[in-house]
Amino acid sequence: MNEQLSNALVSIQEQEAQESEKPPSTRPRPARPWRVAVIANVRGQSAPTDHQAEDAGAEFDKPETIQAIQAAIESDGHSTIFLQADASLPGELQRFYPDICFNIAEGLGGDAREAQVPALLEMMHIPYTASRVLANALGLDKTMTKRIWREAGLPTAAFQQFEQGDEPLDPVLRYPLFVKPAREGTGMGMGEHSIVHTEEELRKQVQWVLNNYRQPALVESYLPGREFTVAVLGRPDACSYSRKPEAYEPDGFVRFPVLEVDNNGTATPGVYGYLTKTLHTGEKGVPRFLCPAPIPQRLSRQLQELAIKAHKAIGALDVSRVDMRLDNAGNPRLIEINTLPGLTPNFSDLCVIANAHGWTYNELILEILILGASRFGMLQAVEPIALPKIKEYAQISRK
């Protein structure tokens, strides 16, 4: 926040204080520094337990990402410790007993592994960031997520789950189709062979998923249009706790710019799959990330609103990332939601999007931390400060 906007906010607060004969409010601050545990699965140090597919553990974080999150949290005066999300976690939590946990753990094994750490923290009555148990379990299960979205009237491509491999194809589905594991993230199990055009290709790819991932295969209508990912941050009372209240709209959510993923000419053409996601900026075969996406404002707003509805439909909290594609007619269709979006600085989609919106990495991490802490009564709410006035001054300061 620049000096002009800061002065404007102070002016508004002083004016309201004079009118109400109460001292001006300030943005929420902890009464004391917090002891924060960053919980994650580290690539190369956490071994998946339920399968050994080629891309097993691809969604785990690198040590550099965890260190960046710790540095961001410590920049606000808190102390941090890293805890591995494995069988040692319950004992480590008892020994360290943090005030709050910054959770980015993917979990080890099982069909709802991203819910493992939140469930443990709920049982131990330890506050934590991001979505709770049920939303994390649902978000990882793409089929259940799509069923909920469909029931809520949200647009998603026609789909069918295969558990045996020999189920008759739903007549509503027409080739080409897209095949992927029903309960994986980070593009795992997705590549050029995921797009199938015949019965023979369908059965072969479904069986490959069943054999390699030991879980159902999700088959859906292939969406040939442009691909977008939308960041969701906030909740209805976010302004009462945020240090960036001017960034939120009246419904409590930030409208970040939309990011477009251009897969043409990538390592997996037309598919934002695992191999493509292992590449870094500048390497051959990496997608083009366009943020803000070069699309009309009307479509951008449509995607933002759809992402928030998708987030709320599964009960996600505070932060998520929603992926979409356009169909043949140019209409957006929901693909999936990530309730634990990646947080690698200058690389993960959420970080790229926040940066394009003018947020630093530290601001993003601390906002996620603050939103999580406020759910557990760790911060005292303040009365939202004349939000329309704040937005007016924010616009002036950008000119």
Image (cartoon, rainbow, N blue to C red):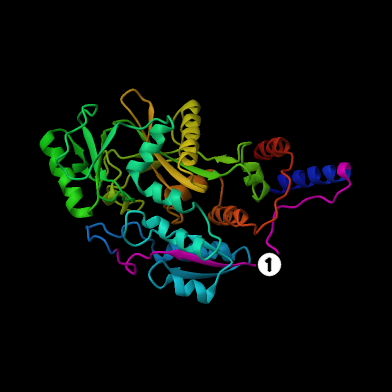
Q: Height in image: 92 above or below 130?
A: below
Where residue 310 appears, as percent x and y from the top left, is 45, 38
Q: Residue furthest top?
A: 329
Where residue 179 appears, as percent x and y from the top left, is 23, 41
Q: Is residue 101 visible?
A: yes
Q: Which residues are magenta?
A: 19-48
Helix, strand or loop at label 1? It is loop
Identify the residue at horizontal 30%, vertical 31% (top origin): 158
Q: Quadrant of residue 66?
A: bottom left
Q: Quadrant of residue 390?
A: top right
Specify the amino acid type for callout 1.
Arg
Is residue 120 magenta-colored?
Answer: no
Q: Height in image: 27 above or below 256?
A: below
Asked whether 174 or 228 is in front, the reply is 174
Q: Residue furthest bottom?
A: 95
Asked whether 133 or 294 is in front, the reply is 133
Looking at the rendered image, the quarter that the C terminus falls into is top right
